[in-house]
Amino acid sequence: MGGEEFRVVIEYPSGRVFGSILEALSNIVDEAVFSFSEEGLRVKALDPAQVALVTVYIPPSSFLTYDLREETSVGVNLSNLMRTLPKPRKSDRVVLRAGEDFYEFVIEALGVKRYRYRSIEVPVTEVPELQLDFKVRGSVYTAAFKKALNDLRGSGVIVFEAKDNKTLRLEAPEVGGEIKFSLTGGSLIELEVEEGSRTPYDESYVTKVSPLCDIADAVKIEFSNDQPLHLAFNPPGGELVEYLSAPKA
């Protein structure tokens, strides 16, 4: 592919952050469309079971280079990408070049490694904009949240519960596990409970976001009785990754 065929050339400063976003996406979906416009990079993907929805937004200001010659959409086979692309390190710079039929990743560290892929056709499922009224809204330090996910991994069900503005609980009733995030304990940043809520979610879906705990200091957590779980990760560069997971039936 000649340089003149590239429609977009972007350079991202942190290989670790970009790699963690790719890893989380691959945990949720096998394929996704990466859309490049003047507003930045956007990805919106619904998992095959239609249980989880992930959206990624990275503004042009987050990139070292954002050279957009034409609005472009790239169909990415995430399963194949994660099998063949080495996990970038924090200091690595990641360059993505995309044209009409192909795209390539370049990882710049001590040396330069180039990986080329064909853009694929990805079926797009229209997802209506959801109007959700969350009764519990809080923020937890990602270090504590990631440890909780690791501790509850394999438990089958994770119940999110909050009765007051002081404590957020994650329970795994099938194995008798419980994690508490509290203001006094230092793991909870803030919590607003408009109405006490307790909702179970599929553990295998909740733990899919574990790699995103490495890209931000805090995770925003929102839920209500019998409503989806909303998690939002907002790194300091202006990026935003949001995740919705339906309650367990």
Image: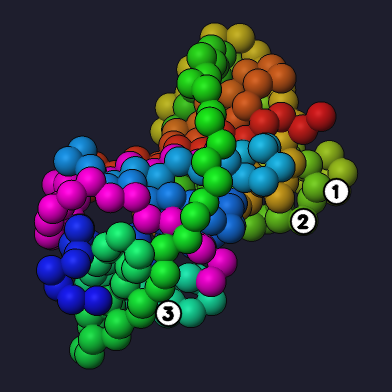
Classify 10 Å Cα crowding around label 1: few (below 14), some (14-19), many (20 and above).
few
Tag 1: amino acid: Val
Q: Is residue 140 above or below residue 35?
A: above
Q: Where are the magenta residues, as a range?
A: 53-80
Q: Nearer the viewer, residue 191 or 25?
A: 25
Q: Is residue 51 above or below residue 78?
A: above
Q: Is residue 6 above or below residue 212?
A: below
Asked whether residue 2 appears in the rendered view, the answer is: yes
Between discs 1 and 3, the one toward the N terminus: 3
- Please give the name of the residue rendered at 30% of the width and 60% of the height, measured from the top-left corner: 100
Q: Nearer the viewer, residue 204 or 83?
A: 83
Classify 10 Å Cα crowding around label 3: few (below 14), some (14-19), many (20 and above).
few
Quarter of the view holding residue 147: bottom right
Residue to which mark 2 is pinned? 154
Tag 3: amino acid: Pro
Mark in front: 2 vs 1 = 2
- Please give the name of the residue rendered at 28% of the width and 50% of the height, measured from the top-left corner: 72
Q: Position of residue 167 (x, y in %)?
A: 58, 27
In 3D space, how far apart are the residues under numbered discs 2 and 1 (Cα atoms)?
9 Å
- Residues tagged 2 and 1 counted as in contact (Cβ below 8 A): yes
Q: Position of residue 39 (x, y in %)?
A: 20, 38
Residue to which mark 1 is pinned? 175
Q: Nearer the viewer, residue 195 or 128?
A: 128
In 3D space, how far apart are the residues under numbered discs 1 and 3 (Cα atoms)?
36 Å
Mark in front: 1 vs 3 = 3
Residue to which mark 3 is pinned? 86
